Amino acid sequence: MPKFPKPVVGNFCWADANLEDPARGKEFYSELFGWTVQDIEMGGGVYTMFNKGNNTVAGALKLPENAKKM
């Protein structure tokens, strides 16, 4: 991800994914982009932060059951 020293209106700022299989997703994105993974317990689930070097670049969580029906 490019790093912008100051915000620019209209620029991409964050990617967040809801994954049916978080373990496969972590493996896939880590291999594809060279990201490292940090899992954070959040009362009721795990939120995954993807990092590139010292920068957090994206996040992911398990797709909620009710969202699968949509």
Image (tube, rainbow, N blue to C red):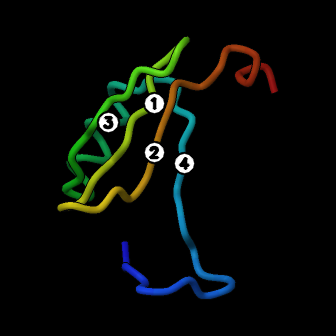
Q: Which amino acid is tagged 3?
A: Lys
Q: Are marks 2 and 4 in contact (CB under 8 Å)?
A: yes
Residue depicted at 50% across the width and 16% down the height: 45
How far, Cα to Cα, is label 4 from label 3? 12 Å
In this rendering, the answer to whether 57 lies above or below 3 is above
Residue depicted at 26% across the width and 36% down the height: 27
How far, Cα to Cα, is label 1 from label 4? 10 Å
In this rendering, the answer to whether 26 lies above or below 7 is above
Q: Which mark is residue 47?
A: 1
Q: Are marks 1 and 4 in contact (CB under 8 Å)?
A: no
Query: Tag 4, which secondary structure?
Result: strand
Residue depicted at 55% across the width and 11% down the height: 44
How far, Cα to Cα, is label 2 from label 3? 10 Å
Kindly identify which residue carries mark 3: 26
Q: Are marks 4 and 3 in contact (CB under 8 Å)?
A: no
- Viewed as shown, does residue 52 lie left or right of 42? left
Dot 1, how many residues are within 10 Å of its Cα: few (below 14), some (14-19), or many (20+)?
Answer: some
Q: Locate residue 46, reporting x and y percent.
A: 44, 22
Q: Which amino acid is tagged 1?
A: Tyr
Kindly identify which residue carries mark 2: 59
Query: From the viewer's perspective, is the residue at label 4 or at label 3 nearer?
Result: 4
How far, Cα to Cα, is label 2 from label 4? 5 Å
Query: From the viewer's perspective, is the residue at label 1 or at label 3 nearer?
Result: 1
Q: Nearer the viewer, residue 58 or 23?
A: 58
How far, Cα to Cα, is label 1 from label 2? 7 Å
How far, Cα to Cα, is label 1 from label 3? 11 Å
Query: Tag 3, which secondary structure?
Result: helix
Kindly identify which residue carries mark 4: 16
- Viewed as shown, does residue 44 lie left or right of 10? left
**Which corner quadrant holds the C terminus?**
top right
Query: Tag 1, which secondary structure?
Result: strand
Q: Nearer the viewer, residue 5 or 17?
A: 5
